[in-house]
Amino acid sequence: MKKGFRFYIALWGAKLGTILLKLLRRNATFFPGKFALKICPDFIGKIDKPKTIIAVTGTNGKTTVCNMIEDILKDNNYVFIDNKYGSNIDAGVTTTLISGVNFMGKSKKDLAVLEVDERSAPKIYPYLTPTYLVCTNLFRDSLMRNAHTEFISGILTKYIPKATTLILNGDDLITSNIAPENRRIYFGIDRLDTDLDKCENIARDIIVCPKCNSKLEYDYVRYNHIGKAHCPNCDFKSPDIDYLATNLDLKNMRLTLKNGDLEEEYDLISDNIINIYNIVTVITVLKQIGLSRNQINESLKKQKIVDTRYSEEAVNGIKIITHLSKGMNPIACSRVFDYVRKYEGDKAVILFLDDLHEAANGSENTAWQYDTDYEFLNDDSIKQIIVAGARYLDDYVRLEIAGIDKNKMICKRDEMSAIDGLKLDGIETVFILHDLYSMELKEAAKKKVEVMISNRRDKS
């Protein structure tokens, strides 16, 4: 596209605005892009871009995948631009592109890693063609905003550029079928001992064949609609996997990744199936841009899941684990609840799921709670559940429906005073499950639990 006067006014204004915001120690990750798009609506199409663009989208895992890709690239001395500290909508992506050009709009970097919100596809992909577009998965999420998975997959299929190579979760029957005309590479995980013949989750986002409407038959189910399936009456089925994780060894924290006749062993940094998928995704992407097994694995061993997503520490023999559990996202919450119930030993759970925060747009729709498997918390190893926050009564009702003994529960509006009721006798692990918008609360709760454990030891 021809740049023109409007483009340069937008670029120079955004560049100067970035400098000013940084001098004022303000966040300069959103406003410059917003300003540029207001002055020049097709700015993304006109600005010079890196030769290779890796875009990552999907319901869950895109932030973790982007962070891991960026950390491994940095460890291997790659130079790139990214929106790690900015937003994943059009304004944030625009700000990132602005950071990668000079005052004449010429690109200074050859590589970009961009997290892209799936709903932003109509505002971004008509102007930007990713070299590779990763889709981690597609699940029901934030019903008031995202409607349903067919709506989101339809948007992606309509707007993804035909020249883009897709890197898709082949174990997800929805994700694996977006933009069918594009070149595609599938990643997945081979059948596990823990996989089931029937789904035990409340929510499944695909049940019937999208071609002939017959009921799908699953060879095995991992969770929700993740697994391997086929239609008994037509040729619809799970795709053949290009990068298949096999020999999953959680004792020694390793897996084997098969690509054709090539088999390579990689280290794991988490035993959570969600993060194992993230690791397989990252390896697949980095192999596409030319990194070797040793480059990837040596850097991978240095990584850890960011503390905003997961943290673990021990205080006087009791573990404290914080785990992100996204409100309004039933599958993400269910995965966390499943992880908690299967974690070894007796535990207490502190639950802060509050979608009434202003940053969550003040949702009043609690339907997601009834798609979430609160029943997973009805486990003998979970000795106590503390629920607090603006939604504590909604959570209490949902926990009662799940059949959880009232004597196990403490439910209060005030988060910190609710923790006063924590009983530590016989408890090996305390889980603090928190929302995206409760990071400060999570840290305060963690410190309070640390003090309670320490005081208990001192008294004994």
Image (cartoon, rainbow, N blue to C red):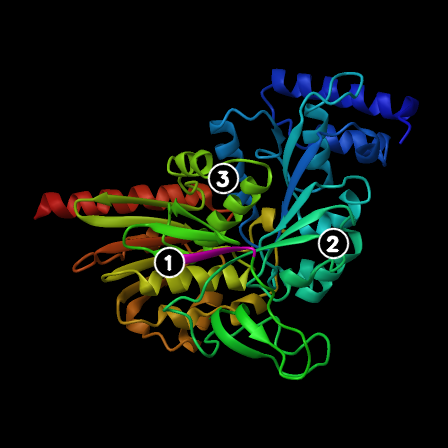
Q: Amino acid at mark 3?
A: Met
Residue on which the image places disc 3: 68
Q: Amino acid at mark 2?
A: Asn
Residue on which the image places disc 2: 182
Gap between marks 3 and 1 measured at Cα: 22 Å
The spot of residue 84 in percent (x, y) is: 57, 35
In the depicted structure, whether residue 2 falls above or below residue 393? above
Check if mark 3's residue and mark 2's residue have beta carbons within 8 Å.
no
The spot of residue 243 in percent (x, y) is: 53, 53
Q: Secondary structure at mark 3?
A: helix
- Nearest the camera: 27 or 276? 276
In the depicted structure, whether residue 331 falls above or below residue 275? below
Q: Secondary structure at mark 1?
A: strand
Q: Residue at x 55, y 63 (%)?
A: 171
Gap between marks 3 and 2 measured at Cα: 25 Å
Using residue 354 as the reference point, say whether residue 103 is left or right of it: right
Q: Secondary structure at mark 2?
A: loop
Tell me which label, 3 or 1, sits earlier in the chain.
Answer: 3
Q: Residue at x 45, y 51 (%)?
A: 257
- Residue 50 numbered mark, or none: none
Residue 415 in sight from this viewpoint: no
Residue on which the image places disc 1: 247
Q: Amino acid at mark 1?
A: Asn
Gap between marks 1 and 2 measured at Cα: 30 Å
- Nearest the camera: 318 or 405? 318
- Nearest the camera: 235 or 270? 235
- The kind of secondary structure the magenta stretch mainly shows is strand
Q: Which residues are magenta?
A: 242-246
Using residue 396 as the reference point, say whether residue 328 is left or right of it: right
Q: Residue at x 32, y 50 (%)?
A: 253
